[in-house]
Amino acid sequence: TSEPIFCTGCGVQIQTENKGELGFAPPSALKREVIICQRCYRLTHYNEVQDVSLTDDDFYKILNTISEKKALIVKIVDVFDFTGSWLPGLHRFAGGNDVLLVGNKVDLLPKLINRNKVINWMKFSSKQLGLTPKSVSLMSTKSGEGVLEVASEIDELRKGRDVYIVGCTNVGKSSFINQLIKQFAGDTDQLITTSHFPGTTLDVIDIPLDDGQTMFDTPGIINHHQMAHYVSEAGLKTITPKKESKPRVYQLNSGQTLFLGGLARMDFTNGERTSFVCYLSNELTIHRTKIEKADTLYQQHAGTLLTPPEEEQGPLEMVKHTFKISDQLSDIVFSGLGWITVRGTGLKIEAYAPKGVGVSIRPSIM
Ligand code: GDP
């Protein structure tokens, strides 16, 4: 075992095993005279930030620090995985600070969708989760939609204060920051720095704002409840929509069920024959069967007919969520997968998803 090596940039201990984690450097970097972690390397050479994951403990220390500051908090979530990318407990740490909630990846929603309905649903869900944002916006760092609007909203809402950008991993926080840097930092290569967060092993990225205040990009936390954690890399490719989701329509009688790959299942237990429209990644296979056959089918074919999961993962432990439908048009939302729009009232539905993955109902946004 060799001596620990520390990054000359941020001081973190260097490791060469886990790419997405703090302190990673490729083994070849150890041969250099000045050793820095990949994150610092990208920052200094490309002015590009890269997200790292961290322990929950360190993350909450960072949040605690924010609660003692006067700042604007910009919280980024993934609109396609709202509950999965939610940072629980942020409201307790916001202190009296304003929160701007930004839903990223809006390009993944069907084009026909009414943006205001999505925003209203985000406002409603935030309140239910205990957070009242000052404002809610949508953007796509991929298509560029809404990014400049969010930037000017930040400038307006911060009223001369510092800004903290928070979000769990994979919401597109780095993509957003990198766009902001391109937009606003211009030639100011040397201005972007990292600083140590007191009491943690972590550093934040400091981006200067034109009035002497700072925008802090905090590291993202891994949210263990995300559907993404139940699938392999290949599985994640399958469930993440790459383009606009094509609605797939099923007319079902009660007693029928739909499997969404092998990651979720929706039983139509009571009600008149009606339509179910699935908005998921186009690559995710939907399998229709009878409820009475569903358990056996899953045990025998999870990982083969019903994928993801992969064959070696086998069947996942599923949790049941029961819904009584009272709206004319409702969406059953499977966090990280998409949703199924159901028509009719007085229906009963039982939905299954891996333990910890959110399944919820909302008045349809379609
Ligand atoms: P971070 O972990 O929060 O910093 O997220 P990243 O910026 O690294 O992005 C995570 C993943 O989401 C990457 O695969 C990005 O390409 C993808 N991504 C980021 N923003 C968007 C977006 O607006 N739309 C879509 N479809 N994908 C995005």
Image: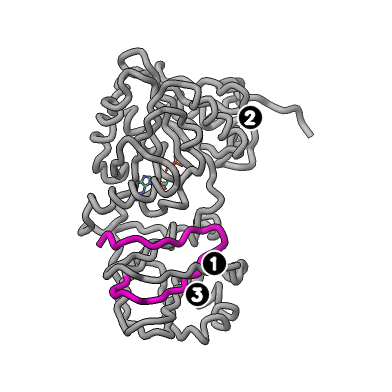
Q: Secondary structure at mark 3?
A: loop
x then y, percent, for residue 31: 63, 28
Identify residue type, mark 2: Leu
Residue density around tag 1, few if under 14, some if 14–19, many if 20 or more, within 10 Å: many
Q: Secondary structure at mark 2?
A: helix
In the figure, residue 158 lies in which quadrant?
A: top left
Judge from the rendering whether residue 302 lies leftward or rightward of residue 340; answer left or right.
right
Q: Is residue 358 magenta?
A: yes
In the rendered structure, which segment of residues is drawn in magenta?
Answer: 342-366
Residue 189 seen: no
In the figure, residue 59 lies in which quadrant?
A: top right
x then y, percent, for residue 216: 44, 25
Residue that badge 3 annotates: 306
Quadrant holding ligand 1? top left
Which residue shows up at 44% across the image and 71% down it? 260
Q: Secondary structure at mark 1?
A: loop
Q: Could you tell me how far apart the alpha carbons at marks 1 and 3 are, in whole angstroms?
A: 8 Å
Residue 141 seen: yes
Which residue shows up at 30% across the image and 41% down it? 136
Front-lying residue, 230 or 235:
230
Identify residue type, mark 3: Leu
Taking 47 as reference, is 296 above or below it?
A: below
Which of the two discs, 1 and 2, labels the residue nearer the N terminus? 2
Identify residue type, mark 1: Pro
| Picture disc at residue 30 | 2
**Mark 1 residue CB less than 8 A from any atom of ligand 1:** no
Nearest-to-viewer mark from 1 and 2:
1
Front-lying residue, 323 or 268:
323
Residue that badge 1 annotates: 309
| Picture disc at residue 279 | none
Q: Main secondary structure of the magenta part?
A: strand
